[in-house]
Image (cartoon, rainbow, N blue to C red):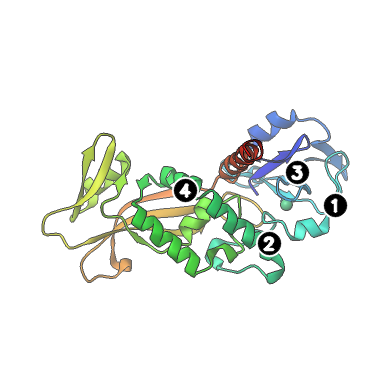
Amino acid sequence: MNVFALITNPTEAIPLTEDIFYSRTNRKPPYIQSFGGKMNSYALCPSCQNPVLMVNRTATETRSGSFYAKHNKGDVPGVAQYHEHKYLNCPLANPARMDEKKRRPPARQGQSDEVKNALIEAFDLVMNFIESDTGVKFQDSIVEDMLDDFSKNRGYEYSAINLYNLPYAFAYMTESKDIFGCSVSKEIADAIGKNSKGFSTKQFHSNYYIKREEGSRSKIRLMFYGHAESVKDGGNEAIIMRIVEVPPGADVDAAEHLYQKKIVLDGAKFFNFYMKRKRRVDMARSKLR
Ligand SMILES: [Zn+2]
């Protein structure tokens, strides 16, 4: 996993990098302690509060390799006791790959309900994350289509979707979408201007709206695919967004690529936003009765 938590706030997910880990723990015990003659770094899993062990791939691979955490199947003195049952139900333990489309067993129905409820309660937040990460502002009719896809597939039942990756997993699990008429970032507008035959953009204030060139019958579609750099119980997960132009009568596979971007999943950002929002809404609800 690429998040961790501290003893003082065991449910707050902190994005995991080597710098952040060392500055938040001050490289002090019990976060650093020796085990079997070796100095290990530990913290907590923000989801199941079991101890996690830091694994550094930089030592054996390239310098850009990542620092990640994996559940430690045993007590770590001063950090946390190991609870097998919580580990087996933790969404951050051995996360399924999104492209596997594996569903949760009935015993983990509670997690599917949690995902479904979060999607309903914080759908505005989920869409804000998707729009800011993709640079595409969707029309409501498209958002409705996305919800239809997700609901028909019962996407909330997939084991790969959880509260830590909700916006990305939601986007990934929807079908490709026609984005004609949507507004896009300048970067995407520039790519469309450079690569498209059938489309261009029109600027209105700071928004760029996709418009069709006269006589063009092509379609412009947005899709999500891939699930790069996934390693077991850790590492950086990413999805690829791609905007393509599909000539009339052609298949999406034969489409021209107009723009592509890799979106790295930030497992802490959405979750912490969501929990804070929930805490404050609950606070208002309990005071304003
Ligand atoms: Zn866990």
Please provide percent x and percent y for residue 189: 27, 44
Residues under labels 2 and 1: Cα distance?
A: 26 Å
Residue extending farthest to the left is 215
Please, what secondary structure does the residue beneath circle 2 have?
helix
The one of 277 and 91 positioned closer to us in this rendering: 277
Residue 238 visible in the current orientation: no
Please provide percent x and percent y for residue 176: 37, 62
Q: Badge 1 local density, few (<14 within 10 Å), some, or many (20+)? A: some
Please, what secondary structure does the residue beneath circle 1 have?
loop
The relative height of residue 24 versus residue 87 in the rendered view (above or below) is above
> Residue at the spot x=50%, y=57% of the render?
170
Mark number, residue 263: 4
Which residue corresponds to mark 2?
Answer: 110
Q: Quadrant of the C terminus?
A: top right
> Residue at the spot x=54%, y=62% of the render?
98
Horizontally, is 283 left or right of 153 in the view? right
**Tags 1 and 3 in contact by the CB under 8 Å rule?**
no
Mark number, residue 44: 3
Horizontally, is 29 left or right of 279 in the view? right
**Tags 2 and 3 in contact by the CB under 8 Å rule?**
no
Residues under labels 4 and 3: Cα distance?
A: 26 Å
Residues under labels 2 and 4: Cα distance?
A: 28 Å
Please, what secondary structure does the residue beneath circle 3 have?
strand
Badge 4 amino acid: Ile
Indicate which disc, 4 or 3, sits on the residue closer to the N terminus: 3
Please provide percent x and percent y for residue 76: 85, 44
Residues under labels 2 and 3: Cα distance?
A: 22 Å
Which residue corresponds to mark 1?
Answer: 74
Indicate which disc, 1 or 3, sits on the residue closer to the N terminus: 3
Mark toward the viewer: 1 or 3? 3
Badge 2 amino acid: Gly
Q: Badge 4 local density, few (<14 within 10 Å), some, or many (20+)? A: some
